[in-house]
Amino acid sequence: MTKEPLVIFTPSGKRGNFPVGTPVLTAARQLGVDLDSVCGGRGICSKCQITPSYGEFPKHGLTVADDALSEWNAVEQRYEDKRGLKQGRRLGCQATIQNDVVIDVPPESQVHKQVVRKRAEARDIVMNPSVRLHYVEVQEPDMHDPSGDLERLVAALEDQWEIKDVCPDLHILHELQSALRKGKWAVTAAIHMGEAGERPRIMHLWPGYYDGSIYGLAVDLGSTTIAAHLCDLQTGEVVASSGLMNPQIRFGEDLMSRVSYSMMNPGGADEMTNAVREGMNALFTQIAAEAEIDKALIMDAVFVMNPVMHHLFLGIDPYELGQAPFALATSDALHLRAADLDLNLHPAARTYILPCIAGHVGADAAAVALSEAPEKSEDLVLIVDVGTNAEIQLGNKTKVLACSSPTGPAFEGAQISSGQRAAPGAIERVEIDPVTKEPRFRIIGSELWSDEDGFDIAVANTGITGICGSGIIEAIAEMRLAGLVDASGLIGNADQTGSARCIPDGRTQAYVLWQGTEDNPAITVTNPDIRAIQMAKAALYSGARLLMDKLEIDTVDRIVLAGAFGAHISPKHAMVLGMIPDCPLDKVTSAGNAAGTGARIALLNSEARSEIEQTVRDIVKIETAVEPRFQEHFVNASALPNSAEPFPILNAVVDLPDVSFNTGGNDDGDGGGRRRRRRRG
Amino acid sequence: MTKEPLVIFTPSGKRGNFPVGTPVLTAARQLGVDLDSVCGGRGICSKCQITPSYGEFPKHGLTVADDALSEWNAVEQRYEDKRGLKQGRRLGCQATIQNDVVIDVPPESQVHKQVVRKRAEARDIVMNPSVRLHYVEVQEPDMHDPSGDLERLVAALEDQWEIKDVCPDLHILHELQSALRKGKWAVTAAIHMGEAGERPRIMHLWPGYYDGSIYGLAVDLGSTTIAAHLCDLQTGEVVASSGLMNPQIRFGEDLMSRVSYSMMNPGGADEMTNAVREGMNALFTQIAAEAEIDKALIMDAVFVMNPVMHHLFLGIDPYELGQAPFALATSDALHLRAADLDLNLHPAARTYILPCIAGHVGADAAAVALSEAPEKSEDLVLIVDVGTNAEIQLGNKTKVLACSSPTGPAFEGAQISSGQRAAPGAIERVEIDPVTKEPRFRIIGSELWSDEDGFDIAVANTGITGICGSGIIEAIAEMRLAGLVDASGLIGNADQTGSARCIPDGRTQAYVLWQGTEDNPAITVTNPDIRAIQMAKAALYSGARLLMDKLEIDTVDRIVLAGAFGAHISPKHAMVLGMIPDCPLDKVTSAGNAAGTGARIALLNSEARSEIEQTVRDIVKIETAVEPRFQEHFVNASALPNSAEPFPILNAVVDLPDVSFNTGGNDDGDGGGRRRRRRRG
């Protein structure tokens, strides 16, 4: 007997010998090669496209002849005529093995294909969605051996797809008989593969072979905005992204005012639940319209949000979250029917809500953990997601800690005299010349700096309306670097600083960043502004420092700034302010909307769901409110760093002026003895 | 060390030695003795009552002293004062073991208590409901170790009740936090124990200890009437029974006319689905009012019905059931949420729908099988449930067969000249004197026979309005016994029979059962009436005979007549007509509403659900429509038995007159040669 032909699959490297005439798809399945098929090898779906390679493969000691696969057949020709096959491609279910061959499975033919992420340090997204399509041929009924149509469909799914013990949603029973007969005893089934101890479930049936796709939503439900990505559940592609304001804003700008609203108004929590669900539905309609798909093709949705939004979205009164011990109604992940949340998607659509970490550290923080995977990191990573609360995670593959720190709204431009939300017209970047003490800045909506030609024209539409969170941070940090502010946070007067932009403002000084026009008032940085930022940054730094204490470390290997705010602040300025611990500047990266990315991972890969549930169980939760050291750190951290502070890395990069503007009457402790100024050249 | 006291529990006989001071409940649990407790031994629920026995127990070689148990304590006294304890009873969680003792667990303290059934041959009902109450104490939240309230409740249920991996219905999340705090960190949970691969599920929470009961419904959804039993899920007691007309009747009296309605009218199936669900809700409101309970305490409901009602109730178009191959959409048992069927019970109420056996043999037949348990029978039992279709089951513990036979509506009084539904005024019992050929009868609504004093007064209200199914069977059988009808089914004329009550009726004769009054027309039995009954009984007999052929037997050991009709017909008359095979008359019993009883068993014992699902899978289904022998039997079975027929047992009991009234022109085959009459007397 001659040896059976050898088949080598790339990129997996899996190999085996198969009898002449074995379809490539069959060989792939037997070897466990990741080759997609919706129709089960019937030449209908064309998902199993492969590329045979011919010629010499010295590495494998193999020569592949032109006749290694069977000849191009009629099914392939029909597909080529109808849709076109890429050069060199064959259908894996049609081409059979005739001789030794090397076969490449291109990414788009892999079930568990990887979805590209740009950031090298972030985890890969491997496709493994909860809902899948399966084409199946069902036995016709037989009076001699009576059985239900459903029972024969279930048996066929087990026979042809090894999906065991599948059960139907009720509406499937309504459509089943006509779908089977219209499809001539073949249907394409959308099946929820089963999770959390649930049986696999038939969600939808199309008569015959369904040629389209199905979709899922990754939703980041923020206090201010709701953002969603619509993803193709077969390719993993984001087909549309959209967002809208959280309609709950009319009940309160920030979370605590919404919690208060629910406490003061009977039925208030329900009102807010209805509002956010209506907002969701409006967003879903909008995103489906943008993608030009039927909303009923959306079969899965993943949600991440902070604990208060979590409770309000689920219809749970957030009362307990407003007071110690901040008990969540539930912290575990939830698998719910979209219909139970009043969401108008596919009638059988499922939802998954990520677990909350603790009463102040929500499913959004869990999503950040899923995106950034600190529990898989070799080096010690600090992940900071800044909002009204900062959620802070610190750890590596040995141990991960998490806490929340009450930064307050200053980083979002609130409580700042000229502050505003990040929106067109807001100053977002600031530089101050250390010699002249003159500022220049950029506003959101324009790429030009304020001292560049055409700036006035560029900002004519929006005006210069205020300063946003990242702008105020840069402004204060630049003021510190230019010697306009001392380490205690006091602004010097015109005399002390040599800058006419320092003007009296009550008992303290203010720095005029922009003089204003007839339409828009001047923009200044006041000493109370600096105090507000000092409080916020102290909270943030103290949280991080507390976690570092728990791990008994003084420096971290890298820092990830998550969230929209994190994407806009400059690491250098953050460190000059002492917002974040000392760390090489090139090791401080922005993860963008990591919570949204985490939601997308959970949507596209159902195994990531049990993974993050385990991670969240393993995370050590630290409650800052009951940690005495948090208060200690907070008191110590309110000052801005000076050159004597433990920021050796920072001090190597920047020169922190050793100035002090304390006036005798308002002594912060280091007295007037150091009131000399050192000017930089 | 002295030997630990010996504890013997009755009636189980379980025994063991326990340290002095062990609570009786603890000892019972360790031995696996079936002793109830909702509060988990905290002296709240009083479900664990036991009766210690004192004195000599020679059988056990034991003397039980008066101090065998600890002294009556304050908890017991409080309960005694508040509610009273039966003489001699103790609370199992309070009384501790001090010395050797014999302890009786009375039936009402057993979790798996038996529900009494009157019929000796029927299976017992052992309590094991799907939904149970559990009192549980939950740990308070701790900021140092944050976790959700739900997660602590789930952990407590596992710790205190060994219920693992329980999950909540969404509405539980809405109520959880206030219930825990109102109950001072103790709640009573109604838990669906999980079935069909589902996790256990929290359905309801009461703050603290809930002292009430919870309920379930066993519903028999017939084409004509919907009947329900409301059962206490803790005691098994039927607290109310009620019924109403199926509102679908306005779409057609019988099943096939409803199937036609759905075929002829777009949306017709939906109309009928809505109608039956509205009827259900009306019935549930009515039955809850009768029992004076809150409908929201109904947490489980079991439904049985024929295949067409099954589909219409579930919202499935019954189109396919109207034509070969009579394919059911689904035949398996279904576990659904009551809300998905638009039923207004507890918001989390579950429903269970028994499996269908085949396209013509529904969940009602499965319920009959559950009630009568042919698969457990030592002797060969034939079970007949007569309606428009007769569902027939035959077998024993080796094998059970089932089929359906199209008897048509004659047994329900339709197609009979003076026929009517079983209702007050209808003749239901008939006797004919074999000498005088004079009849006497009883009507529904009166206990008196028509020749007894006071009969006229007794029937004055209802009148004598017609003859119902059981009445026409007795009438024809009595006519056959009195020699008024021959074996071919022909009525003799006055001359041949010697009775002036035999009068010409077209080309044949009729027998005047009642002369009528001014208000009510006469009631006669006509030859076409006899033909209709002959067709119906032939179908029934042929179905039974076909199953007997499959088992290669000629007699059965016993016959069970199920259904309302089965409860009213006399076995002797049924056998004289040849409706049922030959069988000792004392072995023919009525099971009453066996389908309803089966529903009640499935409601009270969740294990019975998987049991009947297995039984239904094992039942061999015979489709009469494709069995040539069914047609053969049908042709042969249309005659009435005569003394030469194979009914030896019947012939030993009754004397079947050897008469023949064939007239030459309409010869049935045995010609005029036997036209002699033999008179009894």
Image: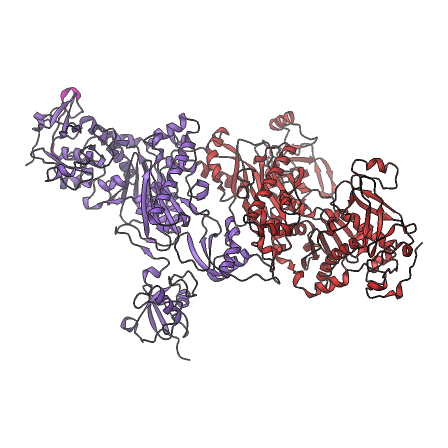
Chain colours: A purple, B red
Residue A678, quarter of the rendered image: top left
User: Magenta stretch containing residue A675, yes or no?
Assistant: yes
**Viewer-closest of B491 and A384:** B491
Residue A416 appears left or right of B679: left
Query: Residue farthest to the bottom?
Result: A1
Question: Residue at left 85%, top 51%?
Answer: B511
**Vertical arrangement, residue A201 with respect to residue B549, above or below:** above
Query: Residue farthest to the front?
Result: B506
Residue B624 appears left or right of A281: right
Residue A11 appears left or right of A672: right
Residue A31, quarter of the rendered image: bottom left
Could you say where residue A45 lies in the image, as x and y percent from the top left?
40, 62
Q: Mainly helix, strand or loop, the magenta region?
A: loop
Could you say where residue A541 lies in the image, as x and y percent from the top left?
25, 35
Residue A329, quarter of the rendered image: top left
Residue B291 in sight here: yes
Could you say where residue A39 lies in the image, as x and y percent from the top left?
43, 62
Question: Residue at left 42%, top 58%?
Answer: A210
**Vertical arrangement, residue A228 with respect to residue B497, above or below:** above
Query: Residue farthest to the left?
Result: A681
Could you say where residue A262 lies in the image, as x and y percent from the top left?
40, 29
- In the picture, the quarter occupied by the C terminus of chain A is top left
**Viewer-closest of B340 and B169:** B340
**Viewer-closest of B676 and B388:** B676
Task: State which region is magenta.
Answer: A656-677
Residue B551 in sight here: no
**Viewer-closest of B281 and A376:** B281
**Vertical arrangement, residue A62 with respect to residue A553, above or below:** below
